[in-house]
Image (cartoon, rainbow, N blue to C red):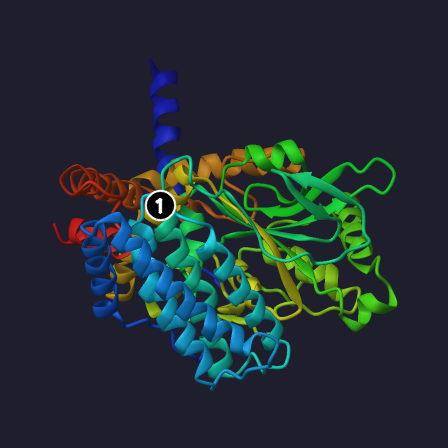
Amino acid sequence: MKILFKIVLILAATYCLLLIPLPQNKGKVQIASKAPFIWNQDERWEQLEKSFLEAKAMPSNTLDSLVQHLRLESDSILNIQEGIATHPEDDFFPLIESAFFRIAPLIAAQEKKSDWYINYYNRVRNKVKEDAIHWDMNTPAARNLSYRILYGFRAAVEEILLQSSDEDFVSTMYVSDGASETPSAEILGIKVHSGDLLVSRGGAEVSAFISRGNDFPGNFSHVALIYINEETNEPSLVEAHIEKGVALASLEEYLKDKKLRFMVMRPRADLEALDADPMLPHKAALYMYNESQERHIPYDFKMDYYDASAMFCSEVGSYAYQQKGIPLWEFTSTISSDGIIDWLHNFGVEHFVTQMPSDLEYDPMLSVIAEWRDKETLFKDHVDNAVMDALITRANAGEKLDYTIWLLPFARVVKGYSFLLTSLGKEGIIPEGMGAVTALKNNDFVARFQHLKKQTELKIDAFRKEQGYVPPYWQLVRFAEGSLAE
């Protein structure tokens, strides 16, 4: 009995000791000095849905005739300027934007859609990418314009896709040829080359935060660099994971790790460095492949792309190409919202002028080759984004991530066990570089996200039953914000 009492006493004393909070040394925080992009166009979104409902009520012949008329009008605007360099301040892109947003809800209402809208979208984004080569992407005009067109058109196209039947849904979009002489392989029917960057969106809650927690909220949360063996044509993905740092994944492992969408990007074939050495992308991929094998590179929670001793996902690609003289992310990503900064700081982020996955799309050094998603995962992506946008609103209003202090001793024991696993080369329950308090706050974040998502999904189901169509993104955000208010 005395032995049992001593054991209980020792456990109680240990538990009390583990309750003592430690000083949180989070280091110097690098804060961005810019302002987040704000659409501020609620009236336009309302009008788009109104136009969609009006179009659904039209006779099909009338609707098809109207769509044809607007198609010719949109084509004429683009045809005049195609092949002619434009500047961010020109009137051309606002005209294109207005024309496309005018026709998009009508196409969404058509029972039988052509692929015109997809081809038009790709023509426009190829023009933006070509013209942006000569823009200073660090100026607000260039940055805002490229975001409005590339992100805004994608949003419109995806609303059309979500109103399509399963048979008419287009999973793969081929955007540009992007000539390459490096070894190649296929991923979901898309031909990829060694040195390509695969920008994707994961299915985890934190993936939504990474993609939306930016001055320019985007669609992507992860970057992987593909290396293809010259002799076997076997592809390997070099990527940084929170759980294990920089590691290799086979194609099967990469696809098994849930992807809501992905986009293939490739250095432009006309870059001076590639003109001198067409195999340079392959050499960059090989360099990073070897680095991942020769040294342990932990995950960089600080998001400091200047320090290669640890790396986050974007840094894997930028570091590899930097070694070969190609600087990616021509403009740095910025995170300026106080609430996002506070929440990300809880996860260990210290650099808010950094390299975010979504921003790679706007880099003029890269061509967009293709994009993939399916209908189910695309809608999940939209729902997760809406939930995250609503949570970010709360974060910016001052709401904090928290944890239950009584769980701290248990989390510290788990962290100690995880440290032991990591030292043996295995994955810990709590990732390397993440402390016990951070892990508990991460649990709080996940719980908030999941609770809000369930409430939002109830409203989505009710809307679909009552209205008979998939709610557009702005409605999803309202559902999420309404659920928070309740």
Circle 1 is placed at which residue position?
162
Q: Residues within 10 Å of mark 1 (few under 14, many from 20)?
A: many
Q: Furthest residue to the bottom?
A: 89
Count the labels in the image.
Answer: 1
Q: Quadrant of residue 42?
A: bottom left
Position of residue 281 relative to residue 462, above or below, is: below
Q: Nearer the viewer, residue 416 or 148?
A: 148
- Work out whether residue 378 or residue 426 is closer to the camera in this orientation and state it: 378
Taking the image as shown, residue 147 lies to the left or right of residue 317, namely left
Q: From the top left corner, tell me how far across and down residue 231 is, in percent.
A: 88, 38
Q: Amino acid at mark 1?
A: Leu
Q: Secondary structure at mark 1?
A: helix
Image quarter of the N terminus: top left
Asked if residue 122 shows in the view, the reply is: yes
Q: Is residue 19 left or right of residue 428?
A: left
At x 42% / y 73%, what residue is drawn? 96
Q: Position of residue 2 (x, y in %)?
A: 35, 17
311 versus 306 height, above or below: above
Residue 224 image position (x, y, % from top left): 63, 49
Q: Residue furthest top?
A: 1
At 67% from the left and 69% from the top, the residue drawn is 365
Does residue 322 sit above or below 58 in this rendering? Answer: below
Percent x, y for residue 478? 20, 55
Residue occupying image coordinates x 24% and y 45%: 452
Residue 289 in the figure: left or right of residue 306: right
Report whether residue 219 is seen.
no
| Nearer to the camera, 300 or 127 | 127
Q: Residue at x 36, y 51 (%)?
A: 160
